[in-house]
Every structure is written in C-alpha cells, then in structure tokens.
Amino acid sequence: MDTTVWAWIGFHAMVFLVLALDLGVFHRRSHRVSVREAGIWTLVWITLSLAFNGLIWLWRGPEDALNFLTGYLVEYSLSVDNIFVFVLLFSYFRVPPQYQHRVLFWGILGALLMRGTMILLGAALVERFEWILYLFGAFLLVTGVRLIFQDDDPDVDPQRNPLVAIARRLLPITPEMQGDRFFVRDSGRFSATPLFLVLLIVESTDLIFAVDSIPAIFGITHDPFIVYTSNICAILGLRSLYFLLAGVMESFYYLRYGLAIILSFIGVKMLTPLVTGWFLGGHGLHIPNTVSLAVIALTLITAIAASIIRSRRLMTATDSY
C-alpha cells in the first residue's frame, strides 16, 4: 500500500484515539473545566501537533514541514474568532459550564467531517481550475479589510439561525436543559433539548468561519494532506483554547486587527503571482512561505502584546480613580 495512504490512515487513527481518550477517560463525567486543566490540554494539543510536524519533516522534508507549521499557525489563530461566538452563544442559552465541553466536543467532531469534505472539494477544484486561487485571494483580501471595519461585537442571533428554525419545525424542544443530554423522551415522545440547538449553532458557526479559513490554507500550500492535517490539528485544540481564553477574550482588543492583517496578507500572497505576471510579462513572483510564517508570527505577537499593554493601562487608569 502507498505510504501516503498509510499516512492518511495513521493520522485518522491517531485523531480518533486521542478523541476517544478525551471523551471516554478524561472527560467521562461532565464537569467545569478549570483554567489549569484547559492550559494543560492546550499544551497537550500543541505538543501533539508539533510532534506530528516533526514526523512530516522526517518523512517529507523541511518544505512540507514548514508548510504544515505555517498552515497550522494560520488556522489556529483564525479559530480565535470561533471563541468570541462560543462565549456569546453559551451566555445567550445560559449553558452551565459543566456542559460546555460536551457541546464543543461533538461540535468539533462534526466540524472535522465538514472541513474534511470542504478541503477535499477545494483541492479538487484547485487541481482542475488553478485560477480559482486568485478568487480565493481576492475573497481573503476583501474579508480582511471588512474585518477591520466591522463592529466589535459579533452578530449572533440564534433565533435567526436557519438550522434552529428547521429543528424547531421538525422536532419538539423541551423548555429547559436536561442535564448534558441532547435528546430525551418527554411525555412519551422523542424530544430535543436546548443543548441540541446550541450544538446546531456551533456547527453552523464553524461552517461560516471555514469559508474564510480554508481558502487561507490554500494560500500556503495546495497539498491536500498538509492542508487537511494542519486544519484538523488546529481545530482539535480549539476546545481547550476556549476554556483557557473565554474569560479574558475582551482583553485581546487588537487581536481582531491582527487576524484581519493575516487574512489580507494571505490574500495578497495569492494574488501576487497574477499581478506581478502582468507587469513582468511572464511568470509572476511568489512570496516564500518562510516570509509568510515570519509575517504571521510577528503579526500575532504584536497584536497580543499590544492588547496586553492596553489592558494593563486601562486597569491602571481604573485603579487610579
């Protein structure tokens, strides 16, 4: 059997093994995830991802390893947008902290399937119609610019979510939470719980954000294996990152601008060969991924550092009053 096939099988075996341990052993009982526990799990997921990156280096060389690392950093940083929405969503539905991990676990499991499908479809389109990369680039550039000027608070109205509307039409919904269960038998009939509605919105939210993040990863590499694995590794670490940052998200004021710059930069990177090709009358210039990694890392570090400085100044000003 081809080594690439074994790589796909081995990667999925590793993912499902870790997920089984996560839900079946470490989070067998619903409980409130502490900041300390979230920090440990965040380190676990990052360590596993970097270890996998090391395997890619040994197997396929430094170029593919660099592409994976750059793609992973892009996807991991863009996943922060999901956290803003999760905070608002759990607050809106008043989901108890001990049930939030269960919602995110199944939500992210569904996200793996959706993103896998979208990535494979995108890879097939890029292979057949390479010009679609320029559309991706233009889309990312416009998205980045719009992100800078959009309102500070994400627009989250669960009542307008089409999946929620369909679920309410097709299924009876219990008026209150039923522990950590998504479905129950209520008065002799099969009913969904509000927690199931939360799960539907988590899934649809990830689908919306995937529209931005998946074109971004194609700006780094066209290799389906690198695109897929870097994306999945980033998504797997999203739950622990949520519990680690949920209480302090308002402190990262400039992070949204950093993400906007990253999206815009990748858009420019994808459009550069086309634009420079027009002026040079032949093959256009390409921005190396070493430069991309440096720009992305520097942008994130600057945005986080500036946010921390701003937060401390506000705290100092508040204390002075």
Image (cartoon, rainbow, N blue to C red):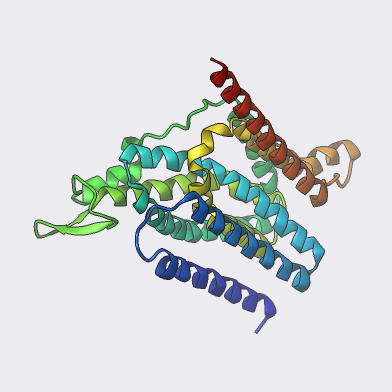
Q: Nearer the viewer, residue 124 or 286?
A: 286
Q: Nearer the viewer, residue 62 or 169?
A: 62
Residue at x-position 90% and y-position 39%: 280
In the displayed structure image, the side of residue 213 where residue 189 appears, left or right: left
Q: Residue at x 24, y 49 (%)?
A: 177
Label tally = 0
**Residue sitting at the far right:** 280
Q: Residue lying farthest left?
A: 187
Considering depth in this image, is 9 or 91 the residue closer to the camera? 91
Q: State the residue at coordinates (48%, 29%).
A: 153
Q: Is residue 287 left or right of residue 5?
A: right
Residue projecting furthest to the top: 321
Q: Position of residue 52 (x, y in %)?
A: 67, 67
- Please tell me in which quadrant of the rendered image residue 211 appears: top right
Which residue extends farthest front?
320
The residue at 66%/37% (across/down) is 304
Q: Does the image show residue 267?
A: no
Q: Is residue 94 above or below residue 313?
A: below
Would you say residue 78 is visible in this rendering?
yes
